[in-house]
Amino acid sequence: MHASSWDVRAFDLLAPLYDLFMPPADDVDVRKGFYCADRDVERVIDVGGGSGRAASVVGATVVDPARGMCERARDRGLETVRGAAEALPFADGSVDAVLIVDALHHFDDRERALAEAARVLEPGGVLVVREFDRATRRGRALAAAERVVGFDSAFYTAEELIAAIESVGLDPRPVDYGFGMSIVGVRESSA
Ligand SMILES: C[S@@+](CC[C@H](N)C(=O)[O-])C[C@H]1O[C@@H](n2cnc3c(N)ncnc32)[C@H](O)[C@@H]1O
């Protein structure tokens, strides 16, 4: 498996406590990017899905390299696949939507992960990224705090994330701006 970063080891250890400290995922925030899809959204994977906090809202399959996080997601009744965002163990064009919630900044290679998300999407499918904008005051504070506690996090600004999504061949659709932002990438439907 590709990912063996300190962040993954940390989440493996933190898994039993993770849900005690994190608020439940907001149903509307998780779902609204799906409305940009040009197809029905049934097969959904949540990459860096952790304990299944967001995946449980939409019944997504959790993809995460941290064993402990996958165990928590299975406790929630979710399907899990241990794997890294940079080498998704899914065939080309095999899913309708890829979710990445509060996780992209932890990935070893964010550009490779976005390219992998684009590869596994069916035409008309959507990548939905929920992230924190480094250009906001709270975004800068979060980036500094994650560094202080030892995470190897790297945050995009909204403009950088839009450009990164476009660079992997998806049509970027900003859905929410602010400290917490949602940027969607739509895989063009074949004519
Ligand atoms: C802050 S947690 C977010 C979990 C979940 N998405 C949520 O919103 O609660 C970040 C997750 O990213 C995972 N992660 C870190 N590096 C990864 C990688 N290269 N590929 C896939 N997941 C990774 C961690 O194991 C962890 O579960």
Image (tube, grey):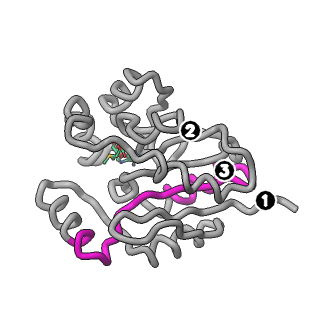
Question: Which percent across, then down, holds residue 155?
Answer: 33, 67
Question: Which percent across, then down, holds residue 102?
Answer: 36, 53
Q: Label 1: which residue?
A: 189
Taking 103 as reference, is 71 above or below it? above
Residue type at tag 1: Ser
Q: Residue furthest left?
A: 148
Taking 48 as reference, is 35 above or below it? below
Work out how far the residue at label 2 is from the one at label 3, CA to CA, in angstroms: 13 Å
Q: Quadrant of the C terminus?
A: bottom right
Taking 156 as reference, is 75 above or below it? above
Q: Is mark 3 within 8 Å of ligand 1?
A: no
Between 138 and 118, the one nearer to me in the picture: 138
Q: Label 3: which residue?
A: 121
Residue 19 left/right relative to 109: left
Nearest to the eye among marks 2 and 3: give it. 3
Nearest to the eye among marks 1 and 2: give it. 1
Q: Label 2: which residue?
A: 89
Q: Residue furthest front?
A: 28
Q: Secondary structure at mark 3?
A: strand
Query: In the image, what residue occupies the spot 57% across and 59% down?
Result: 115
Residue 46 left/right relative to 133: right
